[in-house]
């Protein structure tokens, strides 16, 4: 039987990936408060995305070269790839803002970014608990519920932002398209956080 705590490098790498996603979300909040300097913020987020990619490649290579891993190899791959997806989606928001020369945030963007930061923070907490096993799983279950709650909150904010965008008098069609894509990317990032919760939930059932 594989014991939790063995091969802690896998847990270390997953936690590092989660923390990179959280730092990228924090960088996104900084961007929403200072969009006139969108290019500089976008560059900083590219660096974070590269850091996340390196961690992902490291973990995937270790999974491939390790005979016995502390969790199923497929679960480790799914967790790693989805954590990387969170970072990628957030970085893509900054890339689009730079590409579209958006230098002023709509009022609903900062609250959406703040929810994203909260969600990634809980993801960090949940991923950090994996190394403890599932003998006392209630605290972890509560974190997974919190991720789902935050995703629902984000979804409501997303729908409201789209409604205001589409109903804005005299709105420029091209600008609507640009902002819809930005909102979509933010919502996708939060959805990826919920995917992490779902994967961990499945792992809990498997190892219960």
Image (tube, rainbow, N blue to C red):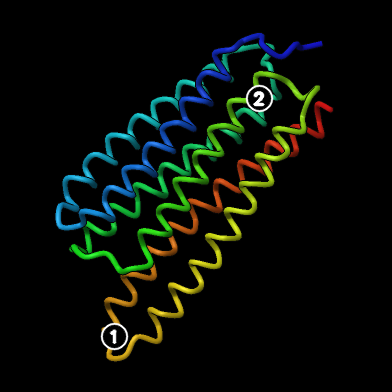
Residue at left offset 34%, top offset 55%: 93
Q: Is residue 169 above or below residue 39?
A: below
Q: Which residue: 43% across, 57% down?
A: 186
Name the mark on residue 130. Answer: 2
Spot occupied by residue 58 in the image (x, y as percentages of width and height): 46, 21
Query: In the displayed structure, does residue 45 sit left or right of residue 54?
Result: left
Q: Quadrant of residue 138?
A: top right
User: Does residue 46 lie above or below 38 as drawn?
Assistant: above
Left or right: 133 as drawn, with respect to 162: right
Give residue 202's quadrant in the image: top right
Count neighbours of disc 1 (C-alpha within 10 A) and say few if under 14, some if 14 to 19, many if 20 or more.
few
- In which quadrant is the C terminus drawn? top right
What is the residue that sits farthest to the bottom in this orientation?
A: 170
Residue at image x 32%, y 35%?
Answer: 48
Image quadrant in which the N terminus is located: top right
Which label was assigned to residue 171? Answer: 1
N-terminal label among 1 and 2: 2
Percent across and percent down for residue 76 are: 62, 28
Does 51 sit left or right of 57 as displayed?
A: left
> In terms of secondary structure, where does tag 2 sit?
helix
Name which residue lies at 40% across and 83% down.
166
Q: Secondary structure at mark 1?
A: loop
């Amino acid at each position: 039987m594989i014991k939790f705590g063995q091969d802690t490098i896998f847990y270390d790498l997953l936690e590092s990936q989660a923390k990179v996603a959280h730092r990228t979300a924090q960088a996104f909040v900084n961007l929403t408060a200072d969009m006139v300097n969108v290019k500089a913020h976008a560059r900083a987020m590219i660096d974070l995305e590269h850091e996340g990619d390196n961690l992902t490649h490291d973990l995937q290579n270790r999974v491939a070269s390790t005979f016995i891993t502390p969790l199923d190899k497929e679960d480790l791959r799914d967790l790693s790839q989805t954590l990387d997806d969170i970072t990628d989606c957030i970085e893509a928001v900054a890339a689009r803002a730079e590409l579209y020369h958006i230098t002023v945030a709509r009022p609903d963007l900062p609250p959406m970014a703040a929810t994203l930061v909260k969600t990634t923070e809980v993801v960090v907490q949940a991923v950090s608990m994996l190394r403890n096993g599932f003998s006392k799983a209630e605290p972890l279950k509560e974190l997974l519920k919190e991720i789902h709650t935050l995703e629902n909150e984000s979804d409501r904010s997303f729908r409201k932002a789209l409604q205001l965008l589409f109903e804005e008098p005299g709105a420029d069609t091209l600008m609507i398209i640009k902002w819809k894509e930005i909102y979509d990317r933010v919502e996708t990032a939060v959805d990826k956080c919920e995917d992490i919760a779902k994967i961990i939930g499945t792992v809990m059932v498997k190892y219960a």
